[in-house]
Image (cartoon, rainbow, N blue to C red):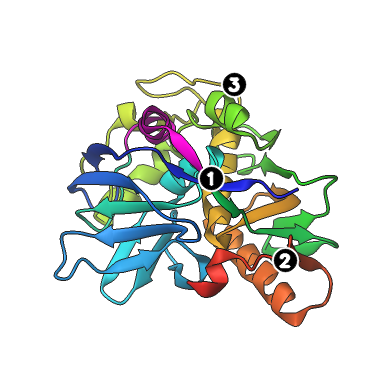
Amino acid sequence: MPRRQTTLAADAELSGVAFFTGGDVHVRFRPAPADAGVVFFRVDLPGQPTVPATIEHALELHRRTGVRRGEAEVQLTEHVLAALAGLRIDNCLVEIDGPELPGLDGSALGFVKTLTAAGTVELDVPRAALTIRSAVTVTAGDATLIARPIEGENTAFEYRLNCGPEHPVPAQAFAATLTPERFTTEIAAARTFIAAAEIPALRAAGYGERVDASDLLVFEEDGSVRGNAARFDDEPARHKLLDMVGDFALLGCDLHAEVVSDRGGHALNRDLCRAIRAALARQDGSVTKGNGVPPVAEAA
């Protein structure tokens, strides 16, 4: 049986610093009606233009994901969308007064705490779902991402991290069947990570001017973490899985599948979302709509 859609029980808000663009950002989360999905409102722009958080509006950005429609652009969407999807909050209006969501501590934990405090309510409308019937695969170089059938109406993610023998982060993996409880306790707190050697190039590009080692995990050449302590032994792999949850939320519906990433990133996540959409459009049987309800993203 399909689960019912949900939304917030009350408004919630938080503020922080944008990691890439460097501005101070305020965000307000508001309840939304059934089938609204997640929609960003750029309240700082004339007319408060909106952009739905769907793959049709995804941008091709480096090291992050964003969406744009007309003048409304919002970057670094993956952490907040992961929090909403991980908590199964399907419909939400997200008001933001800048072009990028706050990075907070590099994880989704701050968003989860804010949204959990607001609470959720069920709506009397079933949640749309896509079911993978046969494998859908995308590749890029030595990276592979596959969505394959799973038993029951479940969503499972696995991330296999291998940055190469010269990288200070060791090879590792993490897998989880997604539930609000597992997301909150095992995934949400995993932070963005970076090798110290990568920082000068990002600084030269104008990124991260207000970010320091307390905001994420900076791995030194010897594998130690600069000015911080890991929350999990496999925190980098968990964070990459967190990113997967956020990026696949761009489908605008539940996904009944096991999704396994071997060295993938945001770009490959978006590619698989598009491949799943294309397979559905071809009606080749590899992807089917669950419960006869069209996914919200198709109408966005």
Instruction: Tell me residue 287's x, y (percent).
Output: 77, 67
Residue 223 shown left or right of residue 29 in the figure: right
Q: Amino acid at mark 2?
A: Gly
- Disc 1 to disc 2, C-alpha distance: 21 Å
Residue 78 shown left or right of residue 237 in the figure: left
Instruction: Tell me residue 10's x, y (percent).
Output: 33, 38
User: Given the current orientation, which residue lies at the most extreme bottom position?
Assistant: 282
Magenta-colored span: 104-123
Sequence order check, earlier mark of 3 and 2:
3
Residue 265 in sight in this render: no
- How many numbered discs? 3
Circle 2 residues within 10 Å: few <14, some 14–19, many ≥20: few
- Disc 1 to disc 3, C-alpha distance: 24 Å
- In the image, residue 238 sits, relative to residue 70, either above or below, namely above
CB atoms of marks 3 and 2 within 8 Å: no
Instruction: Tell me residue 290's x, y (percent).
Output: 74, 60
Instruction: Name which residue lies at 69% across and 34% down.
Output: 176
- Disc 3 to disc 2, C-alpha distance: 42 Å
The question of residue 113 being in magenta is answered with yes
Q: Which mark is residue 233?
A: 3
Looking at the rendered structure, the secondary structure element under dot 3 is loop
In which image quadrant can residue 272 be found? bottom right
Q: Amino acid at mark 1?
A: Ala
Residue placed most toward the observer, 153 or 169 = 153
Q: Amino acid at mark 3?
A: Asp
Residue placed most toward the observer, 259 or 228 = 259
Q: According to the image, label 2 marks what residue?
A: 292
Looking at the rendered structure, the secondary structure element under dot 2 is loop
Q: Which mark is residue 85?
A: 1
